[in-house]
Image (spheres, coloured by chain):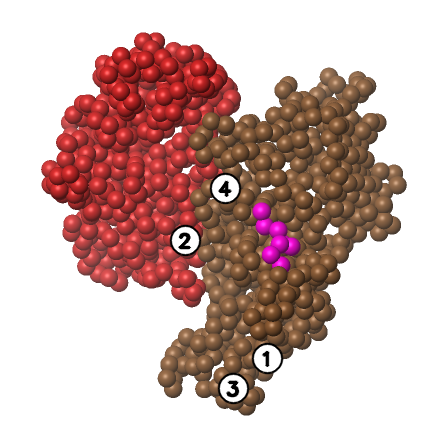
Chain colours: A red, B brown
Amino acid sequence: MLLVLKFAGLCLCLGLCRGLQFNDVDEEAPSAAQTSKYGSLWPLPQEVNIAETSFKLSSSTFRIVDSKQSSAGPSCNILQNAYRKYFEYMFGVARKQEFGKNGRPGLSELTELQVWVTSVDSECDGYPSITSDESYELAVDQPFALLVAPKVWGALRGLETFSQLVYEDEFGAKNINATKIKDFPRFAHRGILLDTSRHYLPVKAILTTLETMAMNKYNVFHWHIVDDPSFPYLSRTFPNLSQKGAYHPYTHVYTPADVKMVIEFARLRGIRVIPEFDTPGHTQSWGKGQANLLTPCYSGSKPSGSFGPVNPILNTTYDFMTQFFKEISSVFPDAYVHLGGDEVDFTCWRSNPDIQKFMEDHGFGHDYSKLESFYIQRLLDIVTSTKKGYMIWQEVFDNGVKLKPDTVVHVWIGGGSNEELSKVTASGYTTILSAPWYLDYISYGQDWQKYYKVEPFNGSCLHLNTTKTCFCRTEQQKKLVIGGEACMWGEYVDATNLTPRLWPRASAVAERLWSHQNVTDINDAYSRLSAHRCRLVERGIPAEPLFSSYCPREYKAV
Amino acid sequence: MLLVLKFAGLCLCLGLCRGLQFNDVDEEAPSAAQTSKYGSLWPLPQEVNIAETSFKLSSSTFRIVDSKQSSAGPSCNILQNAYRKYFEYMFGVARKQEFGKNGRPGLSELTELQVWVTSVDSECDGYPSITSDESYELAVDQPFALLVAPKVWGALRGLETFSQLVYEDEFGAKNINATKIKDFPRFAHRGILLDTSRHYLPVKAILTTLETMAMNKYNVFHWHIVDDPSFPYLSRTFPNLSQKGAYHPYTHVYTPADVKMVIEFARLRGIRVIPEFDTPGHTQSWGKGQANLLTPCYSGSKPSGSFGPVNPILNTTYDFMTQFFKEISSVFPDAYVHLGGDEVDFTCWRSNPDIQKFMEDHGFGHDYSKLESFYIQRLLDIVTSTKKGYMIWQEVFDNGVKLKPDTVVHVWIGGGSNEELSKVTASGYTTILSAPWYLDYISYGQDWQKYYKVEPFNGSCLHLNTTKTCFCRTEQQKKLVIGGEACMWGEYVDATNLTPRLWPRASAVAERLWSHQNVTDINDAYSRLSAHRCRLVERGIPAEPLFSSYCPREYKAV
């Protein structure tokens, strides 16, 4: 990582103009009162070089245009859409200034950002994937600024960065400094999990989250769409699932049109949508609209009337799953689907005589994790036949289920400890980390720092009691850690509090997943994140404050 | 307290129609899955009698009118304003139903709520006070419903209650059951503290809070308007205080017109506005616009350039305070002003040679709490001369400052322990409790239950080590506990997250302060509060959820 700043003088202005005015008299002040030399950049690019020279930008002359050599032209929706959006972010509701209309640009004016997608296939009409190239290079200088990226995905990231470089001087004029940036993500999978089962989130709340994710260079929306409490996914094949299993069959469901809109809105922002249909546990809501899918629990020798996990001993279960995941594989374009597999409670299975017999017949003894693996194994085969890859929660790996080599194991247990990452990668599987980033857990104070300080490559040694083998991560293992996700489970979260609870806390995770491993200065992060938070507020996102302070333009839509 | 419910059958409908659909399968479910027989009433009135008979309400025929005997007629803004508001709350954006316009009301229709203010002086043109009568009686029956209250304040509370009795049947029709309610608050002082110094809150955020307070029968807005970080109060007498001390002199101040609007908006809802101007500590922002007000701190024999608490040894200090509080006493109509007096740090005073000499001259030795008392005593005399009463934080009482008999001592230290209440009331002073209700402290889970379970009269005995005297509270002492306040300090709160963080957690405190001491059933409270929360959401207030569940109409303004 190359961080060069030739002229420190300009930094004060960058910071002040972007909005952080830290209160340095409060008794609980953290140690980060100074302005960052990187202004409000968040997440910090891999290489940044900001010069002293500054240019003015006028809303009446400044344009974002396709470079002539670009493989993405006027027909590329992704970019045309982004140009308009970022213009608005930069200039707000600026009126057209007629008086400057016919004047020539001054020497110190920047009038154009040219966007040059260099690959023959810009991928403009495709979907982002785990292998998408998000790199870009940005050069702000006269006669024009140039954003170069192999694919549209990098161009999107670069546009966000460009918009973050623009600041207001004391007269409200828009300025940008001569800048060179070379940037790419540290991790390929940078996700947010939303839970739309414990509370239904209106589509608008999901779109707002996607919009804010793009401002933080997130690229995966993990849609934990159904769970025990409700089944809001409207299935064309099995409409009864939501008809009976949603909180309400009309007002609390995601129709095919809703899902399509979410996916396209995400695509335009370079964000993958990975749906999770968690089985065999967490499926109470499935049982309401699909008879015989769940295991009948027994009280003594009689059914108790309540139901447990998916019934793994019936052929009808697998017939259902085959049809269901065939639909899912066509509705969701991403190459991966998340199959869950966490927290299976064996109590109900144990109580059921048919299950007991099945266990005996298959020689499972009393080890119900074997039954769980039996189910999961068949489910994985079903999903494989739909040509999808899968992600699973770590228990599936822990239980020794046979996984395809491209399986992504999702680590969620253990909080700060990363031993599981060592185990998973030692077995050759790719993995993503969520354990330290359960953002639904809240506490008083600046907990963003806790999320920020997580280093996925730390604490990577595990001494097994039996063999004393050390699974210290090798470079090869490190490559298998492809990223992480911030999880916002829904027990205590709905549209009323989602956004301020998620942002800017998830921004802390975003920088950890995007920026270089060496970017760890908490004071510098405080300064940039405070300014970034004010930018989110100015863009209409109610992101909560880090500490006593103010934004030049406070959140108004109370 | 008389709680009569003749026909349990209707309750199911009341609850279902009001919106709580509790998810009873989630593993973390609390024990409160059933519907309350009191529907969605919150806070619970003192006496409730709901019958099985129900009446329909039509938006085209139903009217809220002044009773002919009422002392508050069409010129009473408070009521006319409230009638319109509650009509809208009950019927939403209901279109006028032309087809029913000329029809006679059916036998089962309720067409009128008559509001009868019985006192000769309705107090419609006055301000609420600590002695305001908020009692009311409500009888819902044919041919009309009758709300009787001695004063407009009780009428306001009764209108809220009436609106809470209205529910939708499965066809969306508005219904209300025959009901008799007799109600009055347990405590006279039921407040919310907002801190507009650590973060500036736009006036709109304050008004939203006042509106929601009225829905929860709160009656005091404690405006902690200035503090160390910023001084947003625009003083006519000393305009430099905000010109220099606010985060920004134009965008982050409360002008005289703003303050007037807040006070009138509050008055229309029966809410007192008590401003707090906290001295001698918490005054860093005052020093920016008022030279020589704060104590210069010394580093060795030289001034360090930083400043401490208000300088208590200069006559100019008291001249300033005299003028300043003269203005405050005329701007804020309430009979009380909050003078703070908490957390005075003596370090700076100790360092200053002039202060040291003053201490010596006055025989204070090294006891700086004597100097603090010296200052506070003079300040209290100044404020007394403006004909205002005062509230003070508990340290002022603890330090033995001589207080007027009508002083309200504000208890904030010690969390759940209420020993301080015993001490204060044993000394004959009135007191309010905030120690267990610092709502800016957050934690994962249903912390509303913790706030709800507080009983101000519990744990009231204190055995002093020296004398073994027991300050068990007598009935006389209990009368001196006049209420409490939920505090939302501003370190981590601004307009982006204020409302979901405050509600419905502050609703829990509201019921503790309004309802009978015996109202402690946590399951019943869970049911009613869930429905109340959905009502707040429906009225446009982003109140956060208690747990996995849904509202018929989710929050849309994401």
What residue sits 64% from the left and 65% below the top? B471
Q: Which residues are magenta?
A: B453-460
Q: Badge 1 is on which residue?
A: B374
Mark carried by residue A445 = 2
Badge 2 marks a residue whose secondary structure is loop
Amino acid type at image mark 2? Gly
User: In front here: A87 or B155?
Assistant: B155
Question: Is A186 rendered above or below residue B250?
Answer: above
**Residue A17 lies in the magenta stretch:** no
**Residue B456 lies in the magenta stretch:** yes
Quick check: B183 left or right of A453? Answer: right
Sequence-first disc among 3 and 1: 3
Q: Badge 4 is on which residue?
A: B446
Q: CA distance from mark 3 to mark 1?
A: 13 Å
Q: Badge 3 is on which residue?
A: B365
User: In front here: B53 or A9?
Assistant: B53
Q: CA distance from mark 1 to mark 2?
A: 36 Å
The answer, for residue B501, to whether it is visible in the render is yes
**Place of residue A70 in the rendered image (x, y in percent of width and height, measured from the top left):** 19, 32
What residue sits 38% from the left and 56% below the top? A20
